Each structure stands twice: as structure tokens, then as C-alpha cells.
Amino acid sequence: MTTDLVQHDLIRPSEVTLRDTNTTRTPRFSKLFGGWVSQDMAMDLGTANTLVYIKGKGIVLNEPSVVAVQEEDGRAVAVGKAAKDMYGKTSKKIRCVRPMKDGVIADFEITHLMIKDFITRVSTRWQLRRPRLVVSIPSGVTMVEKRAVIDAALASGARQIHLIEEPMAAAIGSGMPVTECGGNMIVDIGGGTTEVAVISMGSTVYSESVRIAGDEMDEAIENFIRRAFNLQVGIFEAERIKITIGSAMPMSETREIKIFGRDLATGVPREMVIDDAIVRRALKEPVTAIVEAVHRALERTSPELAEDIIGKGIYLAGGGALLAGLPERLSLETSIRFLRAANPLTAIVRGTGTVLEDFKEMRHVCIA
Ligand SMILES: Nc1ncnc2c1ncn2[C@@H]1O[C@H](COP(=O)(O)OP(=O)(O)OP(=O)(O)O)[C@@H](O)[C@H]1O
Ligand SMILES: [Mg+2]
């Protein structure tokens, strides 16, 4: 099963952290040991974006999870941003594919091609050989889905694989004291899944993964505009609308955007202006589903843990956390403080990287 590209990436090159070697070891040390000595890597294999972190270096790769595949022989002609940039511009001989859907592998072969390309790229650049890999996966996945990630990573050249649940990684990346005795609640809103989890003493006490996140928001906007205005906008356009004027509650000022699509009555291109109130109506269902998932988690949390959570506030990570007004809306609905992680799009891989940096001490937060 293959998932055709439905969404464009949002990663800006400025978000990629390429730490200088000299900040972690001296040139002389590096010279002595013939380049990089670390062979450990963390990977956030996401529905929308894949990020790689190397121990001691930080984030070294941040690319859309997209592959351009040649129909004839199934070869990957481009992977990541280069593949995404080809979307809508290729002949039928090349298909742009997003091989991950709802946080899990939807197309094993293409995911394998993608991971292999990313691992090869960073291994070559940083002189790594058969790295140990810690990969973050959604909390609600089946054994088969876990196995697929392990197999794809092993087939791509990794020596050893460890898995960590995304909410755990997100909480660590958000700076929450997950190993201490006390409740921490994290909400990770990605492209494919929203995960809500309560963590205490390095273990997940409660977690729920719903397959409603950024992609569903884009689809909701696309469907709403088609029904309301007889205008078909592309999924890229829907995402642009969401990012530019989307919100989870009324804003202090009205915001407008000029949108482009195809008039379904005449078949010709048309442009029009819509405002944030329209986009909010379009986003009502997916946003409500996220609010409900948070409510369910709070209902199922013991009063003792709830007390800690109320004191610390609830953290939001993942790209969906950037939706305007979302922390405020959640705070209003629950009377609890919600805070955005410092950089929601990189919080998960930074959290997994933190585990990698002190693997002996932290490996217990990984799953078996
Ligand atoms: N400013 C913004 N406002 C709203 N949504 C945004 C914003 N920036 C990014 N997003 C959305 O964030 C999502 C991507 O987030 P992220 O990279 O965390 O997902 P992912 O990790 O690839 O997916 P998953 O964890 O579900 O597998 C996309 O749906 C994107 O449209
Ligand atoms: Mg994610």
C-alpha cells in the first residue's frame, strides 16, 4: 500500500542544528581517532518529517518524509526535500510518495529506501559505520508495526535498534522531569497522530494515540472550502492556509488570506479571500478531537498525579502544537496551564537524543 504525497513540508533549513565539532571535542582528539568517534544516532521517523540526531553533534538531518519513486523499477530518484519539491511537477513516470501514514509505516519498501538514504547521507558525512539507532514510534502501535520499523532500520544498515515511545521522547525534549516521582503530561500533535501521555518515574502511566493530527486539519480545510465555496484547493494550499491563519480559538484581530483553487462549476482557476473565522469552522472537528483526547487522559489520571500535572502545566510538542491559540483553547477547556515546548517540531528527536547522550542511565525509558 502506498500513500501518495498529501502534504508539503514545513521545515526551514534554519531549524537544522549543525553543532560544531569543537564544542564537544577538540580537533586534536578528533584527529587522533580519525574523525567522529560516536556511532549512535537518534531518529524521529515521522509521518510528515524525519529528523536525525547524532550523539555529541545534535540534529544533523531534518527532511520531509517523502520519496520520489520511478514507477518503472521502483527506484528512489529523490528523497526528502528534493522529492517534495518535485510534487506536481513530474510526469506519470515518477510518483511522489509519503510512505508513513498515521505515524506508522504504510509502505515498507519505500520507507526502507527513505531510511537508507537518510542513514547513508549522515553516515557518509559524519564517518559513521553501522550506527546504533534509537527510533521514536507512536505509543499505540502493534507488534507488527514495531517490527516493521526495526526491520526497515536494520535493512538500512543500523547495527542495533532501540525504540522509544514518542510521548516519552517529547516529554524529555520539552525538559520535563520524567524520571522523577511525579506526574508529567505531554501532548504530541504530529502530522499523523496526536498522542497524550502521563509519565512518572521513567514510565508511561497512561497513553492514548489518536490518528487525528495535522494531516486531518489540512483535509478538513480542503473539504470545508470545497463544500462552502465550490472551490477545490490542493492539500498544499490547505496546509498553507492552516499555518497562515488557522487557529483553535478567536484571535484578537481578524486575519485574511488569498487562496487559490479550481472552481468546480466552471473548471477554471479562481482566487478568493477567506478569514480566520472560516478556517476555525473548518478545523472544528479535528481540534475538538484533540481536546477530547486530553479530557479523557485527565479523567483517567489519579488525583495524586493530577496534582503534579496541574502544578507543572501540560506541555505541547509536535508541529501541530504551533496552531495559533491551541494552548489557550486547551487551557480554557480544562482550567490547566498548557505550554508549548521550546521548538515543537524538533522536541521529539531532541528528547531521543538526550537519551542517547546518556544511554546507560536513560535506556530504561526505551521500550523492550
Ligand atoms: N505553524 C503551524 N501551525 C499549525 N500546524 C503546523 C504549523 N507548523 C507545522 N504544522 C503542522 O505540523 C505537522 C508536522 O508536525 P511533525 O513534524 O511534528 O509531524 P510528524 O512527527 O512528522 O508526524 P507524526 O508524529 O504524526 O508521525 C504538519 O501537519 C504541519 O502542517
Ligand atoms: Mg512526530
Image (cartoon, rainbow, N blue to C red):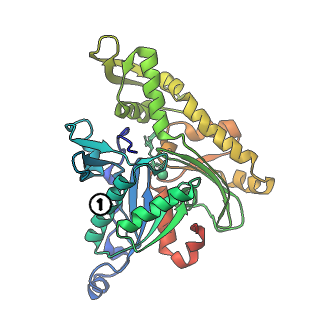
Q: Can you give x and y, in whole percent of width and height, for residue 341 in the image?
A: 53, 52
The answer to whether the beta carbon of the residue marked 1 is less than 8 Å from any atom of ligand 1 is: no
Residue type highlighted by circle 1 = Asp
Seen at 52% across and 70% down, the residue is 355
Q: Residue furthest front?
A: 72
Q: Residue furthest bottom?
A: 32
Q: Which quarter of the rendering shows the N terminus?
A: top left
Give whichever of 263, 20 is nearer the camera: 263
Seen at 64% across and 67% down, the residue is 202
Q: Can you give x and y, in whole percent of width and height, for residue 8 in the image?
A: 35, 41
Label 1 sits on a secondary structure element that is helix
Above/below status of 199 relative to 248: below
Q: Is residue 257 visible?
A: yes
Give whichever of 233, 21 is nearer the camera: 233
Say how many tags the image has.
1
Q: Can you give x and y, in whole percent of width and height, for residue 72 in the image?
A: 21, 46
Seen at 43% across and 21% down, the residue is 225
Dot 1: few (<14), some (14–19), or many (≥20) neighbours within 10 Å? some
Q: Is residue 16 visible?
A: no
Q: Residue furthest right?
A: 303
Above/below status of 157 relative to 168: below
Question: What residue did someone put label 1 on?
Answer: 117
Above/below status of 152 relative to 342: below
Seen at 57% across and 58% down, the residue is 171
